[in-house]
């Protein structure tokens, strides 16, 4: 697995990391034993970045990661957590006092004195644009509660605002073959500023697994059942905001352009990881098989992906751009 510098932190992280929303909630049931196995399998395959959040299972994901870290001293893993979605996402809640309380809880859940990296979890634009936000985050760095901070965003405009801040380590944004707008300005700006990009929802919530059909169903406690139209949170977080039936057709078309022996999810992850400006891709995995195959995608030679890359641009332009590009 290739490792890349994490901005100016002095740390390196794997080009394929692990998203751990699945190990908290909202994706059907994942047992504690299975969750710990997914973490172990990923690390054995060279993954050195876990992405989590205080709100995933209201701390379950962080707590399981904390247990894993305690059982693996000298692990070399960077944990990127997030804060700010256990309260209403209104500007008044993003205070220095709340930042302190939220990070204290995550430090306890993860069993660490200093959080490696904490990302604001899709706050309102007014929070991303405010000097006070960064003053409060800088204060947490200064007294050792966190080592670095970043922002997880919904839109490219929010990403560009965050990237313009000097103290930022990373921006986390949805970027995948069904969501190409970050290629226009966000990735070049991050590259120029030395800000790391974490590409989330890289498999469009599984649509880019290529194994769903019109009759695939999801558990009632899975957001792919209850958030298709943005009923619980931003619609873009479920299937990347792509209409499900359109996504099935688009995934089929991409499957026709795969290199021999490479699966659609593996090609998607390798393509994302090889775009200039991306530091790490953070697919979620519910099983060890998924975790293993996602990590292995980090070894695919990008030079083998030219036909796939052309298909990504073509399918996006024909089927998705008009709907997706203006929204995020
Ligand atoms: N606001 C935010 O900051 C935010 C929002 C969303 C996500 N995230 C982070 O980003 C991470 C990744 O995004 P995501 O989990 O939402 O979406 P994703 O990575 O695009 O999709 C994950 C789903 O894809 C399927 N999958 C994964 N690996 C596979 C493989 N090798 N073969 C076939 N299918 C595979 C699984 O679906 P099945 O469940 O059907 O098996 C899995 O649950 C999250 O875990 C979280 O850490 C952050």
Image (cartoon, rainbow, N blue to C red):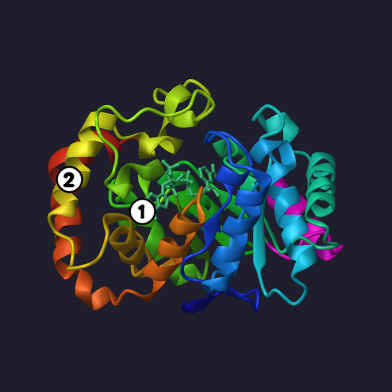
For mark 1, what is the residue?
182
The answer, for residue 119, to whether it is visible in the render is: no
Span highlighted in magenta in the image: 132-148
Side of 147 where 172 appears, left or right: left
Specify the quadrant of the image occupied by residue 137: bottom right
Residue shown at 28% from the left, 74% from the top: 302
What residue sits 66% from the left and 61% below the top? 79
Where disc 1 sits, the SS reads helix
Mark with earlier residue (1, 2): 1
Q: Nearer the viewer, residue 12 or 210?
A: 210
In the picture, measured across the screen, residue 118 lies left or right of residue 318, that is right
Q: In the depicted view, which residue is nearer to us: 181 or 314? A: 314
Furthest toward the front, the residue is: 33
Q: Position of residue 128 (x, y in %)?
A: 59, 44
Q: Position of residue 311 (x, y in %)?
A: 15, 56
As displayed, is residue 235 above or below residue 156?
above
Q: Position of residue 202 (x, y in %)?
A: 40, 52
Query: Is residue 9 left or right of 173 when viewed as pictured?
Result: right
Query: Where residue 286 appears, x then y in whole percent?
Result: 51, 47
Q: Secondary structure at mark 2?
A: helix
Label 2 Cα neighbours within 10 Å, binned few <14 / some 14-19 / many ≥20: some
- The local crowd at label 1, few if under 14, some if 14 to 19, many if 20 or more residues have their Cα within 10 Å, is many
Q: Which dot marks residue 102?
A: none
Distance (Cα) linking label 1 and label 2? 23 Å
């Amino acid at each position: 697995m290739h490792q890349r510098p994490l901005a100016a932190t002095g740390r390196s992280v794997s080009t394929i990391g692990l998203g751990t929303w699945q190990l908290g909630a909202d994706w059907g049931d994942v047992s504690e034993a299975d969750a710990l196995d997914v973490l172990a399998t990923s690390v054995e395959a060279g993954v050195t970045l876990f992405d989590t959040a205080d709100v995933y299972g209201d701390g379950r994901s962080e707590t399981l990661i904390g247990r894993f870290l305690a059982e693996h001293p000298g692990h070399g893993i960077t944990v990127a957590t997030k804060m700010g979605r256990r309260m209403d996402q209104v500007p008044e809640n993003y205070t220095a006092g709340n930042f302190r309380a939220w990070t204290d809880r995550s430090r306890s859940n993860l069993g660490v004195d200093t959080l490696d990296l904490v990302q604001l979890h899709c706050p309102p634009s007014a929070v991303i644009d405010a000097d006070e936000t960064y003053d409060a985050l800088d204060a947490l760095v200064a007294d050792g509660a966190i080592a670095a901070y970043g922002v997880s965003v919904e839109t490219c405009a929010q990403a560009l605002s965050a990237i313009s801040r000097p103290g930022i380590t990373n921006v986390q944004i949805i970027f995948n073959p069904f969501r190409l707008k970050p290629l226009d300005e966000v990735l070049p700006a991050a590259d120029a500023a030395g800000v790391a990009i974490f590409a989330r929802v890289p498999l469009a919530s599984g649509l880019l697994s290529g194994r769903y059909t019109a009759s695939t169903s999801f558990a009632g406690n899975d957001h792919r059942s209850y958030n298709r139209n943005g009923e619980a949170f931003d619609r873009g977080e479920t299937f990347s905001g792509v209409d499900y039936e359109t996504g099935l057709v688009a995934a089929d078309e991409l499957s026709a352009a795969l290199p021999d022996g490479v699966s659609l999810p593996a090609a998607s992850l390798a393509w994302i990881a090889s775009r200039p400006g991306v530091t790490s891709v953070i697919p979620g995995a519910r099983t060890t098989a998924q975790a293993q195959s996602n990590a292995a995608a980090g070894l695919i030679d990008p030079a083998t992906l030219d036909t796939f890359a052309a298909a990504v641009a073509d399918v996006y332009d024909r089927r998705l751009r008009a709907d997706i590009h203006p929204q995020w």
